[in-house]
Image (cartoon, rainbow, N blue to C red):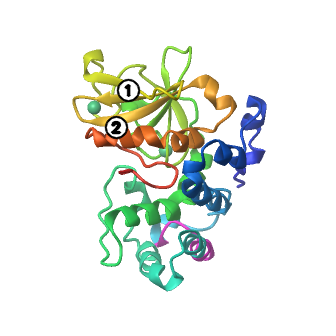
Amino acid sequence: MLLLPYSKNPSRILRGAMKTLEEIQKERPYLKEQLDLYRKLQGLRSLSFSTEGYIPMEKGFYPPDTLVYVITEVSKILGIEIERLNWVKDMITSGNIDFRRLPIGDIQLKHNEYSQEELDVILYFISKPFFLHEKQKLSLDGIYWDEGKCPVCNSVPSVSIIGREEKRRFYCSYCETVGYWKRIGCPSCLTEVPEDITIVMLDAEEGIRADLCERCKNYYKSFNSSMLNEYTEEMLDLISLPLDIIVQQKGYHRSSPNPLGMKRLL
Ligand SMILES: [Zn+2]
Ligand SMILES: [Zn+2]
């Protein structure tokens, strides 16, 4: 199995002149810290591993060598000593952390050295190669999302693309699968009543908006499809971070994390 790195993905090349991370950083100096972290994550995103002859669910989610590699990389990326991550490794090996429960918000990890937000980021990074492996294996891009959830990992999406199509295209922040769901509605509580949805835009950013659900206080961001010529979905999520802050200050929350594993951005 082979995971294509960011720059070699043929669908990206066909889309035209994508901006490089350096160009984006020049455009948006206030995102330096986030873009630096995102850059460090690329090695993990392109990690390929095989589960042939191995039963992941019995022993954790990675072959043992791969797990050691992933934990070592995450320790370097986040600047945490490897010894301080051994407990996560042990929990994964013993089957006490089920990555598949992560997107449905059903992992309640506690550790006195880390805050809940830090634990979310650590787990998001460690599980990233697993989710990309799942996407590659199941290959469900472009289908309709029943109940508004990613068909690979059941996450409620926080990023969507809106173009001429009648349906809205959603993007899964865990496995990066793309699929369709209703143009108006909330994928969290499934309301389709237009009055339940409030739209917020930033004056300075054309083509970017947030759809806020007044019923359950979930929100997701929407991007004009033409923006995919210059940015990946992940990059769109990152560059629109100021919109997350504004919306979260008003009391709304996102269901899936941004590309750095963060849901709360205040
Ligand atoms: Zn997914
Ligand atoms: Zn809702």
Q: Does residue 53 lie above or below 260 as drawn?
A: below
Q: Does residue 36 lie above or below 140 as drawn?
A: below
Ligand 2 within 8 Å of disc 2? The answer is no
Dot 1: what SS? strand
Residue at x-position 55% and y-position 70%: 74
Determine if the magenta segment contains residue 160: no
Residue at x-position 68% and y-position 48%: 21
The amino acid marked with disc number 2 is: Val
| Residue at the disc numbered 2 | 247
Farthest residue to the bottom: give it. Answer: 83
The amino acid marked with disc number 1 is: Val
Residue at x-position 40% and y-position 71%: 95
Q: Earlier in the sequence, mark 2 or mark 1?
A: 1
| Residue at the disc numbered 1 | 200
**Does residue 134 show up?**
no
What main secondary structure does the magenta stretch of the protein show? helix
> Looking at the image, which is closer to me, 246 or 210?
246
Tell whether label 1 touches label 2 (CB within 8 Å): yes
Q: Which residues are magenta?
A: 59-69
The quarter in which the N terminus is drawn is: bottom right
Image quarter for residue 155? top left
Where does the image place residue 110, in percent across and percent down from the top left? 29, 71
Q: Is 229 displayed left or right of 87 in the figure? A: right
Q: Is 116 displayed left or right of 65 in the figure? A: left
The number of callouts visible is 2
Residue at x-position 52% and y-position 41%: 237
Where does the image place residue 53, in percent across and percent down from the top left? 63, 67
